[in-house]
Image (tube, helix red, strand yellow):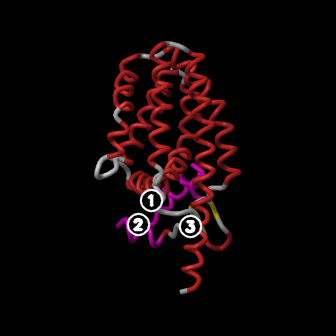
Amino acid sequence: MARVSDVAYASLRREILSWELLPGTVLAEVEISQRLGISRTPVREALARLVSDGLAEPLGGRGLVVSGVSAENVVELFELREALEVQAVSLAAARRDPAPFLALQGELRDVPALLAGSDPGHNAYYELVTRFDDAVSDAVRNPFLAQALAGVRTHLSRIRRLSRDNPERLNDAAREHLLIVDAILEGDERLAVAATLVHLNRSLTSTLGSLSSTTEELRELEKDVTAR
């Protein structure tokens, strides 16, 4: 049975990664405990884990707030991501179990239909990307590399949501992931690395553009709140 603090952590983490809790949002223990219907002690434990993850940070006398996302942060994250992902896909191509990648291959081919539905399957798409990440982490058979990737991917999950209103980019990303999966299934390490580098370059360009637009939206929201 999950501890109360684990449940609180999972709930808050999901809200931050999905942008339900925006950067700068105050994470007040009393409000959170009342909203989740739990005591303040497990909330305090959950918040400490979020700080450790880099998803929350102290801000003067305001206590803890949801950490910000800046262009500088994104570039630094992608620098680390490139080093880890390139090594990971190379090892995955060499050590793979074909079964999970064959399943991913079929699902990635169906992404255009998934995103074109009357109820766009963005959440289903993000779950598919998570399964892709997990398959690569399992295939490398290196717990230290897998752990390092997990830390980076926590922040990537949040950043990916910046493309939430851009189905064109999501379709392109799915095709890029499919090329990586094809290369892994073929055992072609060089092709897997090349496809990954293309994907990372395009993802960074798209993310920085989306971040700029999101930053402007947040500034407008702040102006509206101040004017009330």
Q: Nearer the viewer, residue 64 or 17?
A: 17
Does residue 176 sit above or below 94 in this rendering?
below
Quarter of image, res 143:
top right
Whole-Å distance between the Cαs marked 2 and 1?
6 Å
Predominant SS along the magenta part: helix
* Magenta region includes residue 3: no
Task: Look at label 1 and name its amino acid.
Answer: Pro
- Answer whether residue 54 is magenta in the image: yes
Front position in the image: 23 or 228: 228
137 to the left or right of 39: right
Give the SS element for disc 3: helix
How many other residues sit within 10 Å of disc 2, few (<14), some (14-19) or many (≥20)?
some
Q: Position of residue 140 (x, y in %)?
A: 52, 21
Query: Of marks 1 and 3, which one's residue comes earlier in the chain?
Result: 1
The residue positioned 45% from the left and 72% from the top of the image is 31
- Span colored in magenta: 30-56
**Whether residue 206 is situated above or below residue 41 in the rendered picture:** above
Who's the residue at 60% across and 39% down the image? 202
Q: Nearer the viewer, mark 3 or mark 2?
A: 3
Q: Which mark is residue 42?
A: 1
Residue extending farthest bottom: 228
Q: Amino acid at mark 3?
A: Glu
Based on the displayed image, in which of its 4 quarters is residue 134 positioned?
top left
Q: Which residue is mark 3?
A: 217
Mark 1, secondary structure of its residue: helix
> Which residue position holds label 2?
39
Q: Earlier in the sequence, mark 3 or mark 2?
A: 2
Q: Vertical placement of 91 versus 29: above or below?
A: above
Q: Please name the residue shown 59% across and 60% down the image.
A: 213
